[in-house]
Image (cartoon, rainbow, N blue to C red):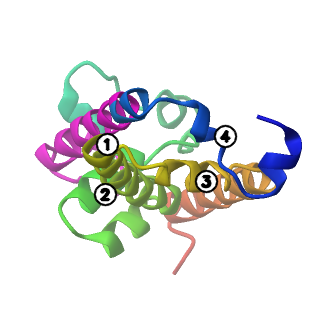
Amino acid sequence: MTQAAVQAGHPPAEGISTTLRRVIGGAVALGSTTLLGLAAWLEPASEGLGTHSQLLILPPCGWILAMDLPCPTCGMTTAFAAAADGNLAGAFVAQPMGAALAVGTAMALITGAWTAATGSRVAWLFGRLCTRRAAWLTGIAFGAAWVYKIIAYKELLG
């Protein structure tokens, strides 16, 4: 596809067969379903972190043990578990970025299922959101969520 066609708004997905779009959509839907299903099976930890220990294969957070500070992903599993239970406010309190990622995973599930069922090119629209600016904003949001988690863990919110 030419650059002019892409700039004119013709999706590059035109070069991808409907069958391949359906397979990719199904894989995304299956992965998202697995992740959200596992999260729904877990009981969110009331402390806002530590839910991952229910998986039995994951050790306690090494950062907390070594430095008494939460790691950048502390609270993510708890946020996913709360969001999967429908408690978006609790997910946000546990880890704001984890709550956003859980909602994004649910959106990926819906989009993947739709694409698998219809062969739609709708996923291409989400792909257009993946820009350098979006990557920077996501990184900043991730950092801000980590700072929030440190403040909450150290009980500095009052």
Q: Nearer the viewer, residue 46 or 23?
A: 23
Q: Which residues are magenta?
A: 23-51
Report how far apart the C-alphas of labels 4 and 3 lie in the structure. 36 Å
Q: Return the mark for residue 129.
A: none
Tell me what residue is drawn at x 54 percent, y 58 percent.
149
Assign a secondary structure to mark 2: loop
User: Upstream in the sequence, badge 1 or badge 4?
Assistant: 4
Q: CA distance from mark 2 to mark 1?
A: 8 Å
- The crowd level at tag 3 (other Cα within 10 Å; few <14, some 14-19, many 20+) is many
* Position above or below: 26 against 43: above
User: Which residue type does callout 2 highlight?
Assistant: Glu
**Mark number for residue 12?**
4
Instruction: Decide whether residue 39 is among the magenta residues.
Output: yes
Query: Which residue is rendered at x = 42% and y = 47% of the image?
Result: 76
The earlier-in-sequence mark between 4 and 3 is 4
From the viewer's side, name the closer residue of 127 and 9: 9
In the rendered structure, find residue 146 and report the number of the disc placed on it. Answer: 3
Q: Secondary structure at mark 1?
A: loop
Helix, strand or loop: magenta stretch: helix
* 3D distance between C-alphas at marks 2 and 3: 16 Å
Q: Are marks 2 and 1 in contact (CB under 8 Å)?
A: yes
Q: Which residue is mark 2?
A: 47
Q: Amino acid at mark 3?
A: Trp
- Name the residue carrying label 1: 50
Q: Is residue 154 magenta?
A: no
Of the numbered discs 2 and 4, the one sitting upstream in the chain is 4
On the image, the x and y values in percent for residue 63 come to: 54, 33
